[in-house]
Image: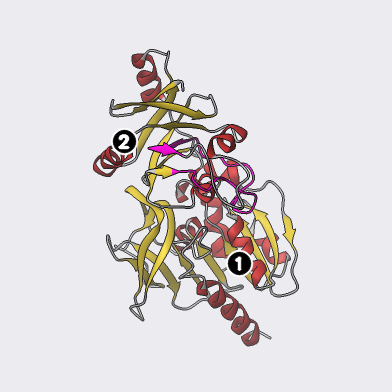
C-alpha cells in the first residue's frame, strides 16, 4: 500500500496508508460517531467540502450497495478511517468501500489513530486539513493548507439546477433543495406526497405559483448566512403555506424569523445524539450532521423551542407561535437510522391538512 499523509492546520501530521482515489485534497476536517451508515454519510451532501473521519474502528465491513445512496454524486472531500474492510460481507454488497471511493473520486487514508484525531478536533474545534500522497515536502503542503480559503458556496454546489417532480397522488409539497438526502424523498413518498423539488434560490412567487399544500426546507452544507435570498423567500411564504424545515432548513427558518446562528466548536455528526422534546420529556435518538446551530440567547418571541440536545442543551427544534411552521435540527428522515423521530413527517401531514381545512 502506498503511504499517504493527513496534515492538520495546527501542524499535526498523521501518516497512514492510501485507499480510494489518488487525489490530494484540502477541506474542513470533521468527525462522525456513527457505528454504521458510512455509505449514507459519505453520500450525504451536508459533508460537501469536508474531510470525514469515522470514529468507529472498522469501516466498510458490509460493503456498498445500490439502495443506501443519499445522493448520486457525493461531494465529501476525503475519508479518514482506522481500518477499512478489504473483504465486505453482506447479501446486498456490490462494492468494497475502496472501489466505491475510487469510483466517486474521493481519496481515503487508513491506519490513522482516529481517537487521537477526534480528541484534537474536540479540543481545538474543526479545522482545515489536507490529505496528500507521500512525496511533496511537508513545509510546502502546510503553507498551502494555511493559505487555502475554503469555499462558501457549498449550497449552490449541491442544490439541483432545475426543478423536477417526484410524483405522488397525495398532498402537494414543494421541497426546496439546499442539499437534500434521498431519504427525505423516501419519507414523503411513503406518505404518497406529490413532490416538486426546486433549486435553493427559487423565489417565493415561483413557489406560490405551484399552489402547494406545504413547503419543506431541506438540509444542506455550510453556513446559513451564505444564502440570504432564502430568508426573503421564507418570510414571503410563511403564513400562506405550512413550512417544515430540517437541519439547514431549520437554521434558515429560525433566521428568517429573527433568530441568530453560530458556528459550533466541532458540531454534531453521527446517529446517536439524544434529543429531548421539551413538552413531553420524550427522548429520541437522532441522526445529526451540522456545524452551525440556532442561538438560544435572544431567540425572538414568535418562536418557541420544542427540542433540545440533552448533552450541550443546543436548540434542536423550534415552532412558530402564531403561524403554521416548525423545524428541527436533527434528521427525522434518519438514514441510516434511528427512526425515532420519523413521526415529525406525520405532524407535517397533519399541519397541512388542518391548514387546508381552516382556509377552505
- Indicate yes or no whether the magenta region holds residue 270: no
| Place of residue 46 in the rendered image (x, y in percent of width and height, measured from the top left) | 50, 48
Label 2 environment density (alpha carbons within 10 Å; few <14, some 14–19, many ≥20)? some
Nearest the eye: 29 or 100: 100
Q: Main secondary structure of the magenta part?
A: loop
Marks 2/1: CA–CA distance: 37 Å
Location of mark 2 (residue): 113
In which quadrant of the rendered view does residue 110 lie?
top left
Q: Which residues are magenta?
A: 59-84
The residue shown at (62%, 87%) is 358
Dot 2 or dot 1, earlier in sequence: 2
Q: Residue at x 34, y 40 (%)?
A: 126
Answer whether residue 81 is visible to the viewer in this image: no
Measured along the vertical axis of the image, is residue 348 above or below residue 111? Answer: below
Instruction: Please state, as top left, top right, bottom left or bottom right, where the C terminus lies in the image.
Output: bottom right
Viewed as shown, does residue 302 lie left or right of 354? left
Q: Is residue 247 above or below residue 61?
A: below
Measuring 31% from the left and 35% from the top, which residue is drawn there? Answer: 113
Residue on which disc 1 sits: 187
For residue 130, what is the image quadrant? top left
The answer to if 83 sits in the magenta stretch is yes
User: Against 61, is 304 above or below?
Assistant: below
Residue 333 lies, in percent from the top left, at: 53, 63
Amino acid at each position: 500500500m502506498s503511504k499517504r499523509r493527513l496534515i492538520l492546520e495546527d501542524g499535526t501530521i498523521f501518516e497512514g496508508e492510501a485507499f480510494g482515489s489518488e487525489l490530494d485534497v484540502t477541506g474542513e476536517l470533521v468527525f462522525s460517531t456513527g457505528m454504521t451508515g458510512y455509505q449514507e454519510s459519505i453520500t450525504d451532501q451536508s459533508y460537501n467540502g469536508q474531510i470525514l473521519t469515522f470514529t468507529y474502528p472498522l469501516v466498510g465491513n458490509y460493503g456498498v450497495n445500490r439502495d443506501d445512496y443519499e445522493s448520486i454524486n457525493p461531494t465529501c472531500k476525503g475519508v479518514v478511517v482506522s481500518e477499512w474492510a478489504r473483504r465486505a460481507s453482506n447479501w446486498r454488497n456490490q462494492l468494497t468501500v475502496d472501489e466505491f471511493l475510487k469510483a466517486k473520486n474521493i481519496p481515503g487514508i487508513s491506519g490513522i489513530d482516529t481517537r487521537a484525531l477526534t480528541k484534537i478536533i474536540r479540543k481545538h474545534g474543526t479545522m482545515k486539513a489536507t490529505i496528500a500522497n507521500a512525496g511533496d515536502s511537508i513545509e510546502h503542503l502546510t503553507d498551502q493548507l494555511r493559505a487555502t480559503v475554503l469555499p462558501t458556496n457549498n449550497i449552490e454546489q449541491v442544490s439541483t439546477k432545475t426543478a423536477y417532480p417526484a410524483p405522488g397522488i397525495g398532498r402537494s409539497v414543494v421541497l426546496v433543495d439546499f442539499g437534500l438526502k434521498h431519504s427525505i424523498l423516501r419519507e414523503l413518498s411513503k406518505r404518497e406526497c406529490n413532490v416538486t423539488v426546486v433549486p435553493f434560490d427559487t423565489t417565493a412567487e415561483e413557489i406560490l405559483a405551484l399552489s402547494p399544500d406545504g413547503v419543506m426546507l431541506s438540509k444542506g452544507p455550510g453556513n446559513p448566512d451564505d444564502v440570504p435570498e432564502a430568508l426573503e423567500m421564507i418570510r414571503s411564504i410563511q403564513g400562506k403555506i405550512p413550512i417544515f424545515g430540517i437541519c439547514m432548513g431549520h437554521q434558515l427558518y429560525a433566521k428568517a424569523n429573527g433568530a441568530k446562528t453560530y458556528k459550533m466548536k466541532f458540531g454534531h455528526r453521527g446517529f446517536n445524539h439524544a434529543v429531548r422534546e421539551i413538552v413531553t420529556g420524550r427522548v429520541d435518538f437522532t441522526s445529526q450532521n451540522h456545524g452551525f446551530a440556532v442561538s438560544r440567547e435572544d431567540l425572538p418571541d414568535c418562536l418557541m423551542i420544542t427540542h433540545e440536545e440533552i448533552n450541550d442543551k443546543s436548540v434542536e427544534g423550534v415552532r412558530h407561535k402564531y403561524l403554521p411552521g416548525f423545524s428541527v435540527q436533527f434528521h427525522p428522515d434518519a438514514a441510516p437510522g434511528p427512526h425515532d423521530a420519523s413521526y415529525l413527517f406525520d405532524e407535517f401531514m397533519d399541519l397541512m391538512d388542518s391548514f387546508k381545512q381552516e382556509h377552505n
